[in-house]
Amino acid sequence: MTITARLKGASGRKLRLLCKLEGVSITDVIKESLEEYFDRHVPSAAPYEIGKNLFGRFSSGRGDLSINRKKYLRKKLREKHIRDSRN
């Protein structure tokens, strides 16, 4: 992949000076910068590993919730309707 970037003002001057002082190319500095950015912002773990501390955290205690969700929802809505009609 080829990318073109334009740096105006101080950023461009600083980059050229840094490259000259360190004896590296602008491309090398940008590649290294991108790798550091990716290391900080892109998760290296699988999605399950990232969220496993959240799974089941607010458990209902019902092991069949995914199967009987409609039954439980109907029951909750009936209870709410009864409560609301009393007020």
Image (cartoon, rainbow, N blue to C red):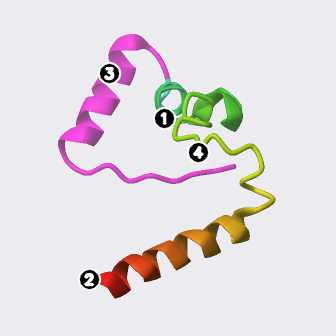
> Mark 1 belongs to which amino acid?
His
Q: Secondary structure at mark 3?
A: helix
Could you tell whether 36 is left or right of 52 in the image? left
Question: Which quarter of the picture shows residue 22?
Answer: top left
Q: Which residue is mark 4?
A: 60
Q: Are marks 4 and 1 in contact (CB under 8 Å)?
A: no
Q: Are marks 4 and 2 in contact (CB under 8 Å)?
A: no
Q: Secondary structure at mark 4?
A: loop
Which of the two discs, 3 and 1, sits closer to the camera? 1
For residue 41, the mark is 1
> Mark 2 belongs to which amino acid?
Asn
Percent coordinates x, y for residue 17 in the rendering: 29, 25
Q: Residue at x 70, y 64 (%)?
A: 69
Gap between marks 4 and 1 measured at Cα: 33 Å
Q: Is residue 58 magenta?
A: no
Q: Secondary structure at mark 2?
A: loop
N-term-proximal mark, 3 vs 2? 3
Up the image or down, 13 lies above or below 39; here it is below
Q: Which residue is mark 2?
A: 87
Question: Which one is in front, 42 or 74?
Answer: 74
Residue 51 visible in the shown view: yes
Question: Which one is in front, 78 or 22?
Answer: 78
